[in-house]
Each structure stands twice: as structure tokens, then as C-alpha cells.
Image: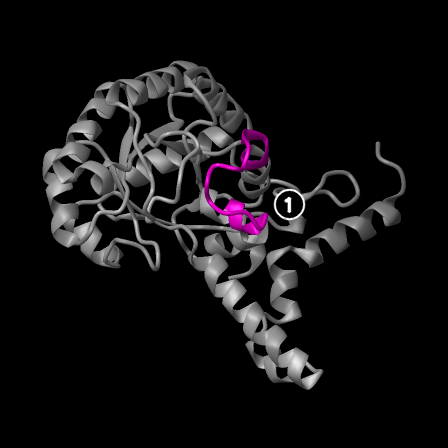
Amino acid sequence: MSATHLTGATVGDAEPGRTAPAGLFSAVSSPGDRRRALRSALAADRICRLPGAFSPLCARLVEDVGFEGVYVSGAVLSADLALPDIGLTTLTEVVHRSRQIARATERPVLVDADTGFGEPMSAARTISELEDAGVAGCHLEDQVNPKRCGHLDGKNVVPVEDMVRRLGAAVSARRDPDFVICARTDARATDGLDAAIDRAKAYVDAGADMIFTEALADASEFEAFRAAVDVPLLANLTEFGRSELVGAAVLEEIGYNAVIYPVTTLRIAMGAVEDALREIAETGTQTGWIDRMQHRSRLYELNRYADFNHFDSALFTHGSWR
């Protein structure tokens, strides 16, 4: 599929030299369109798959391959900054990366907003900033601030009442009712499955549109959660964690509505980069990797190089704007 199909627009949609081709600099669909698309996907019979994107170009590829949405992982953003996932990133950094990714794709973007970057008022501001960034939704978690990676030891959760206030503030700040606010609970690892289910129910009562339970062990626990909670559910299929990688088909059969693969693309990319760099360091050449690289022509297809070049040429051909 060519990159122009991502927007449904081609250079021919514009009058040369007078109008930029649709979708050349940002998505054609409005943030509202993409939020409604996420709502529709969560209500559909098929599970909504959201691979993590570590860059706008990666998000473009996620769309081109045919996934229903894009995920922005807090762990990926931290790692990309060469930082551990321990609550060191800021709201400004997360919003900036989310805006870059949202402008590059027609798919809805769901963002990891950690604990809301502070107390309830900070969570409220987080929703406002992410709405302005054009994303379709986010999830807020019930960990103590600063948080820890959800699949490692050492994390703690706040009292239920504190998370309810966090969510209440977030919901009250939402301007677009289609913006999805998902509540994540990390209580499975700290307090057990039943406690996590009780928390999820309280978070739904507080206004959460979707529930994300981190670090469920296996399919039986996903089933138990689905039986107990009657709102859309999101599953996390991350590698090297506490959860069995049961797969999207199994989750769909259980009745889950969405699944994220948060760090997968970064791990694949960095694994390949490391292997290639080691070979180059040893041999002095990258020739052994030529057939394993993304070809320049494919890169140009994804970033619409031909469309930009045509538009630029048209500007010089037709002279000044009228």
C-alpha cells in the first residue's frame, strides 16, 4: 500500500501551486473523527490492536500495515530518552511526542499518561493538553507517584479514594466527550486479582470509559476480569513481563476490546540496530545488512517524498501565491 493511501489523498487533489495536497503536513481527519473512530473500534466485535510507535514514521507504518490504532508508551518514551521507566518523563515531553505521532497518522492514538504527572489538578491538565495534541485517549494509573514499570517489582498503588479523585479531576477536565479516559490498575501484582477487580469497578463509577489491568498472569485471569467488569477492557501484551502472551485472537474470544504491544517495535528496532552496529564495527561495512534494511524507496513512500517534491516543484513553476 502506498503512503498516499494513508490519507486517501493524492497530489491531484490540489491545484498545483495553490493548495498543499491533503494530509501532507498533518492528518486529514480531525481529532474528533479519530476519537469517534476509537470509540467505534472499542464497540466493535473485533479487537482493536494498537502497536506502540516510537516515532511518527513508525506510527505511519503501523497504519500502513493495517492496524486499527497506535499506542504511545511511557516506557518507550523513557527508553528513547535513555531513561528508565520510573516517572522521570514530564507532561511536556509526553505531549510533544504524542502530538508528533498524532499528526502523522489517520489512526486514533492512545497515550500512556502515567499517573497524570502529579496530583488531581495535574491529571486534569494532562487531559486538556492531550486533547490539544490531537490524540484520541489516554490511560491514567493508580500507582504511587513516581511510578514504576508495571511488570517489575517495587511498585505500590495509592488508596482507591486517591485514584478516584485523580480520575474525577481528569473526567471533569475533558472537553470532548469522545476522548477516551482509561483507568489502569496495578493492584493485581500488589494486592491480588480480586482487589484489582474491586478497584476497576470503583474506577468505572468514577467515570472511566475503559479499564486496563496491568500484569494479569494468563488467559484465566483475563477471563475472570472480563466476567466481572462490564466496560471496554484493554490488555497489555508486552514481552518479558508477567503476562502470558496469549495473542489477540484469544483475547478477542474472551471479549477484550483492545490490546497494546507497547515496546515491541522499539525492541525489534534496537535489537536489529545493535546487531548491525556490531557487524559494522567488526567488518567496516554494512553490506551484509543491505537486504535486511528498509529500502530507501520504501522510506520515501512512507514519508511521501514524491508528493512533497511535486508540491515544491509546483510552487516554483507557478510563481507567487494568489
Q: What residue is at 65 percent from the left and 55 percent from the top?
A: 304
Applied colour scheme:
one colour
**Which residue does the numbered mark 1 point to in the structure image?**
13
Q: What residue is at 29 percent from the left and 28 percent from the top?
A: 209
Which of 185/64 is in front? 185
Per the rendered image, the range of residues in magenta is: 77-94
Q: What residue is at 34 percent from the left and 32 percent from the top?
A: 143
Disc 1 packing (10 Å; few <14; some 14–19; many ≥20): few
Q: Is residue 182 above or below residue 67?
A: above
Tell me: 151 left or right of 190.
Answer: right
Tell me: 266 left or right of 300.
Answer: left
Q: Is residue 55 above or below residue 147?
A: below
Residue 214 on the magenta span = no
> Residue 167 appears in which quarter of the rendering?
top left
Which of 157/230 is in front? 157
Q: Amino acid at mark 1?
A: Asp
Question: Is disc 1 placed on a helix, strand or loop?
Answer: helix
Tell me: 305 left or right of 228.
Answer: right
Residue 54 image point, x, y percent: 53, 51
